[in-house]
Image (cartoon, grey):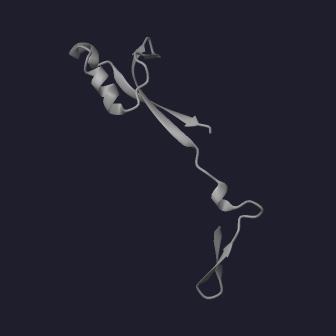
Amino acid sequence: MILRRRGRGGLAAQSCGHLPCYNFEMPKVIEQWLLFKYIDGEFTPLSKPFKTKEQAEKARLKYPERERRTIGVGVIRLSKDD
């Protein structure tokens, strides 16, 4: 529904043409977290995708301190089509 000005401060409701406005939905986005490292300038995933950032950080802590500094935690955003 689109609200438009009508006269002195009043608003009039108007539909979105031939389609009802409430049918437009935002696509669902799935976030997956993984551990990665750059080797020779190339992105190299080191783990399977995790559902939360906390799980990925916990997996990163299992690496030795010296190696942990070179490992990053990254996110992948995928759109889920119903």
**Residue pictured at 58% horizontal, 85% vertical:** 9
Residue 47: percent from left, percent from top: 40, 17
Q: In terms of depth relative to the viewer, which is nearer, 21 or 40? A: 21
Residue 2, placed above or below residue 75: below
Location of residue 44 by image quarter: top left
Q: Is residue 36 left or right of residue 59?
A: right
**Residue pictured at 25% horizontal, 17% vertical:** 62
Residue at the extreme left: 65
Q: In terms of depth relative to the viewer, which is nearer, 48 or 45? A: 48
Residue 3, placed above or below residue 23: below
Residue 40, placed above or below residue 50: above
Q: Is residue 72 left or right of residue 20?
A: left
Q: In terms of depth relative to the viewer, which is nearer, 23 or 29? A: 23
Residue at the extreme right: 18
Residue 19: percent from left, percent from top: 74, 59
Residue at the extreme front: 82
Residue 82, placed above or below residue 2: above
Quadrant holding the C terminus: top right
Residue at the extreme bottom: 8
Q: Is residue 48 left or right of residue 9?
A: left
Q: Is residue 7 left or right of residue 30?
A: right
Residue 65: percent from left, percent from top: 21, 16
Location of residue 40 by image quarter: top left
Residue 25: percent from left, percent from top: 61, 51
**Residue pictured at 23% horizontal, 13% vertical:** 64
Marks counted in the figure total: 0
Quadrant holding the N terminus: bottom right
